[in-house]
Amino acid sequence: MSAGADGGGGAAVAVGSSEGGPLEDGFVPSALGTREHWDAVYERELQTFQEYGDTGEIWFGEESMNRLIRWMQKHKIPLDASVLDIGTGNGVFLVELAKFGFSNITGIDYSPSAIQLSGSIIEKEGLSNIKLKVEDFLNLSTKLSGFHICIDKGTFDAISLNPDNAVEKRKQYVKSLSRVLKVKGFFLITSCNWTKEELLNEFSEGFELFEELPTPKFSFGGRSGNSVAALVFQKT
Ligand SMILES: C[S@@+](CC[C@H](N)C(=O)[O-])C[C@H]1O[C@@H](n2cnc3c(N)ncnc32)[C@H](O)[C@@H]1O
């Protein structure tokens, strides 16, 4: 497993310190895996947006959004394809998608403040056809289904750090993903806590690797690697 930020700037959900011991997979449980943490983050960011118009953190930086949009363009994903952003945060990626012409996009987040912030940013941008919902992806309350594309930028990472049975939560994540994504639909994940090999293992049931997206490389002490993994899976 690795932790770090993308070269393009922006924070990453890196493994943090905590009072608890390591989880079975070696992660140290962290507040970053809890809803209370994200509620506090987005309440603060909402206030900052209202006061100064600052949209807040772009996780993994601008380049992480451009990389996904380039992939969608390269593969000629139709502009009316249904896209779900899982754990949308401030919704800035939804705004980018809309600006590129995508017209059937939905953002969910379990933090009501995140959805309120996304809504405010989207409204300020004058975009009207973006759907937003407060939803816990691990406990979906509505009939969200049939998406062509699902995006995850940092949400699976956050869930993996949950102090309360993260292994089970990761399994539930894969189940929810299977439920919302169409057969042959694509799942684009950007992660700083999991390597390519680990992600292949996590999503081995019901998904196959379609493509690995290039991310910045680092080298240190004669070893080189990627600080961020960006993979595209296809639902089988
Ligand atoms: C690292 S942030 C990334 C935010 C956004 N995807 C981005 O790239 O800026 C993780 C996000 O996942 C959300 N999240 C974590 N667990 C979730 C869950 N079970 N259901 C829905 N959203 C969740 C958090 O509220 C937070 O907005």
Image (cartoon, rainbow, N blue to C red):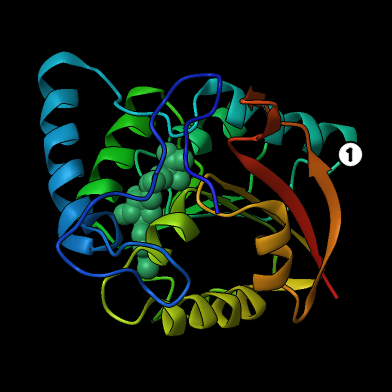
Residue 130: % across, % down: 49, 45
Q: Is residue 123 above or below residue 132?
A: above
Q: Is residue 189 above or below residue 180?
A: above
24 horizontally vs 75: left or right: left
Q: Residues within 10 Å of mark 1 (few under 14, many from 20)?
A: few
Whether the residue under disc 1 has CB within 8 Å of ligand 1: no
Q: Nearer the viewer, residue 157 or 235?
A: 157
Q: Quadrant of residue 212?
A: top right
15 horizontally vs 131: left or right: left
At a point 66% along the width and 35% down the height, the residue shown is: 226
Tell me if residue 102 can be seen. Answer: yes
Q: Residue furthest front?
A: 221
27 horizontally vs 95: left or right: left
Count numbered badges in the picture: 1
Q: Nearer the viewer, residue 38 or 129?
A: 38
Callout 1: helix, strand or loop? loop
Q: Nearer the viewer, residue 3 or 60?
A: 3
Residue 112: % across, % down: 22, 56
**Amino acid residing under circle 1:** Lys
Tell me if residue 134 can be seen. Answer: no
Residue 3: % across, % down: 47, 43
**Circle 1 residue:** 76
At a point 32% along the width and 62% down the height, the residue shown is: 28
Residue 229: % across, % down: 65, 44
At a point 85% along the width and 48% down the height, the residue shown is: 211
